[in-house]
Structures are given as structure tokens and as C-alpha cells.
Image (cartoon, rainbow, N blue to C red):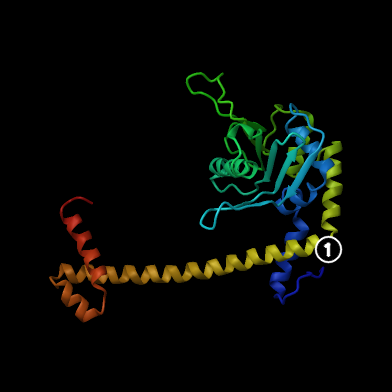
Amino acid sequence: MAEVEVDIDISDEMRQKLDESWNKAGISNDFIFAKVMQDEHLLAELVHTILPDISFSKLVIQSQKAVETGMDTHGVRFDIFALDDIGRAIEIEMQVLNRGNLPRRMRFYGSLVDSSMLEKGALYSTLKDSYVIMICPFDQYKLGLHRYTFTNRCRENLELEMGDGTTKIVLNADSTADDVSPKLHAFLDYVAGRSSADELVEKLEKAVKKAKANKIWRKEYMTLEMRDLENQEIGKEIGKEIGKEIGKALGKKDMVRNMLVDGKTPDEIVRFCGISIDLVREVQDELLIENAGLK
């Protein structure tokens, strides 16, 4: 078993989980994807594959770019954020898990892309076009397409575009349709774990192997994964405690309900059982609603 290169003590079970996770990680892993796409030539080839209608000569890449808008607002860390030579923004995410919030996630990401491009005091007209791209191993819209492209259009006239310069693209690797270029088809097959004889795929596979041989990146990945696993365990424990408290509260409510039905007054229940008056009143209100036939 390979040694996990982290600077803190971990259990054998944790070590095994981390090793297995690293060994399985491929291009569909967002960490690996972000590292591989630090190569400007590879990213440029991928962007040309996804967006064949735009041309550029250079990309300025910011891998794992963090965007924060304020202390009390939600921030994100983009997998890949790049600006081309005329200032257009291209944001790409490898979204493996279907959390049921992809459209609204893309809406939020698009807003952060815009805010990162518009300097304080700048005119709105200076905003360049933006592209938010999600690469998924699942079919978000269940139509069997490889590619779903969205721009803002007028509902009364679908040929009329708003003209705000935003484009959102959802790529679906779980498709066998013949609806995209052979190059994009091959890339999405590769994301889905299917073999594909394609020049870009071969380059990506070599880049993935090189990334996984990088000890510094391996250590970074292991550390992040370890924190995630630990947070999951902490979350489980917190969930158990919350469950216990809910159980206790429900038990108390049942007791209060029975005592109220038996004719005990709120003051008597508080005095005899040590239960808060707020809980007694809450149960009392519920009983009143039920008795009034409103529930």
C-alpha cells in the first residue's frame, strides 16, 4: 500500500480510504481536472472543442479560482476560470454529483463570473461575453442530448435574444446520441469512462497520469479528501445528536399533549414536569387547531 504523504497522524482505515480515492481519481475528478487544465494548450484545445464558433489566441488561466463577494454571502471556488485575449470569460466545472440544483448553481456561478470581470466604477457596457460550462456524467434534462446550450431569449419571440452576452452549457457524458462533433463525443466518452481513440483524449490521459505522479498534488488531494471525510464523520455525529434532541422534544410534546387532554393546566405541567411554558403553549396551540378542524 502506498504511503499517504500527509503531515498528521491518520488511522489505517482513513489511510486506506485516501489511497483508494486517489487511485480511482481520473479526469472526472474535479481536483484532477483542475490540475490537468492548468496546461494552456490542453485547455485551449478543450475550449475549441466545446466552443468551436469562438476564436482566440491566448488564455489566461486561474485554476481553482476563489470568488468571495462579502463576509455574509456565499462564495465559490471555480474548477477552471480563464480569460481569452479579448477578455471573454470561460468558466468550466466538472460536476460529477447530481445534487438537484445545477440550473440555480449555474445562475449563481454566472453572477460571480460577471462580478469578477466588472471593476468598481466600470460601465456595464464593458462586460465581455461569458461562458459557464458544466461537464456532467448525468443527463440533467433527460432528453438524451450530449449538449444543452442556453442563452436568454424572449418568450414571446424565441428568435429574439436578450443580447446580454451570457451562455450556459450543460454537457452530458451519459449519452450515445450522434449530436455533437466526433471530438466532443470522444471527450465526453472519456469523462464517462469509455475508451475513445482521439488525439485530445490521448493527451488528457497522459496529463492525468502525469498529474497523479506529482507528489505535491497528491499530498494536496489527500489533505483535502481527509478533511472532507472528517467533516462527513463530524456531520454524522452532529446528525445523531440532533436526532436525539428531536426525539426528546417529540417525547416531551407527547407527554404534554396527554396531560393537557387529561385536563392539566399549563402551570401544573410546568410545575410538575419541569417543561418550559413555551413548549406547553406550542402543544396547546396545536390542540386548539386540531379541535377547530383546521389541521
Residue 90 point in image, percent of width and height: 70, 39
Expressed as whole percent of the image width and height from the top left, the position of residue 279 reads 26, 68
Residue that extends furthest to the front in the rendered view of this protein = 121
Residue under label 1, please give it. 215
In the depicted structure, whether residue 253 falls above or below residue 138: below
Which residue: 17% across, 58% down? 288
Crowd around label 1: few <14 · some 14–19 · many ≥20 (10 Å) = few
* The N terminus: image quadrant: bottom right
Amino acid marked by disc 1: Lys
Who's the residue at 16% across and 75% down the image?
267
Q: Residue 190 or 284: which is nearer the viewer?
A: 284
Q: How many marks?
A: 1
Res 194 visible: no
**Is 274 on the left-hand or right-hand side of 38?**
left
Q: Measured from the top left, where is residue 208 in percent x and y?
A: 82, 50
The quadrant where residue 126 appears: top right
Q: Nearer the viewer, residue 119 or 110?
A: 119
Q: Quadrant of residue 182?
A: top right
Give above or below for 65 relative to 276.
Answer: above
Q: Secondary structure at mark 1?
A: helix
The residue at 75%/55% (across/down) is 25
In the displayed structure image, the side of residue 81 where residue 164 appears, left or right? left
Whether residue 241 is visible to the viewer of this picture, yes or no, is yes
Q: Nearer the viewer, residue 225 or 89?
A: 89
Question: Toward the viewer: 46 or 12?
Answer: 46
Q: Quick check: 239 left or right of 249?
A: right
Outermost left residue: 263
Q: Position of residue 221 (x, y in %)?
A: 74, 61
